[in-house]
């Protein structure tokens, strides 16, 4: 069996296999937060990604136009409502607003149905191509 590509086209049956360990962490527009995009449909605004937060990183105040789902793989992150630690999951309702922080750093699997809306515009935090 040949070595898998980091991302590849769907199989004839519709599966797309992704090897996150073969993807490079890409910087976002937010200091101390890097991203690996696992799935993206730009037309619909959907994205599934891994986010790596360095210790002390923060995501500025933003609104979720649709549900946001986060599973913490390692470390922890928090907002005014609470903290999510490794092995825990949090989701946020459409229209919810918050600022998020990580004192110790973390790696999160995040699922978005629409990009976050920041005061400076919309986006997931990845630099535009």
Image: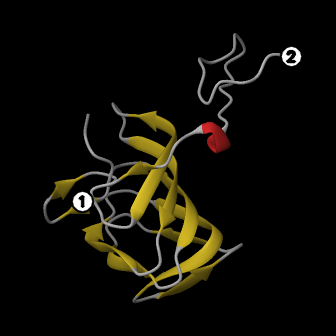
Residue for point 26% across, 34% down = 129
Colour scheme of the picture:
secondary structure
Secondary element at image label 2: loop
**Residue at the location (63% across, 18% down)?**
10
Reading the image, the residue beneath label 2 is 1
Cα separation between marks 1 and 2: 43 Å
Q: Residue furthest top?
A: 12
For residue 100, which quarter of the picture?
A: bottom left
Q: Secondary structure at mark 1?
A: strand
- For this view, does 10 lie left or right of residue 124? right
> Does 15 sit left or right of 104 as displayed?
right
Task: Give residue 127's position: percent from left, percent from top.
Answer: 27, 46
> Which part of the image, by quadrant, shows the N terminus?
top right
Instruction: Look at the picture and state if 100 lies above or below 82.
Output: above
Residue designated by label 1: 117
Labelled pair 1, 2 in contact (Cβ < 8 Å): no
Sequence-first tag of 1 and 2: 2
């Amino acid at each position: 069996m040949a070595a898998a590509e980091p991302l590849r086209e769907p199989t004839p049956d519709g599966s797309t296999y992704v090897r996150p360990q073969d993807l490079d962490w890409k910087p976002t527009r937010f200091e101390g937060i890097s991203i690996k995009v696992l799935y993206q449909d730009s037309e619909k605004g959907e994205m599934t990604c891994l986010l790596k937060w360095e210790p002390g990183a923060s995501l500025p105040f933003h609104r979720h136009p649709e549900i946001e789902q986060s599973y913490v793989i390692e470390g922890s992150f928090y907002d005014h409502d609470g903290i999510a630690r490794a092995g825990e999951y949090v989701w946020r309702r459409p229209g919810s607003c918050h600022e998020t922080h990580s004192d110790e750093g973390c790696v999160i699997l995040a699922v978005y149905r629409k990009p976050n809306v920041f005061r400076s515009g919309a986006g997931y935090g990845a630099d535009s191509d």
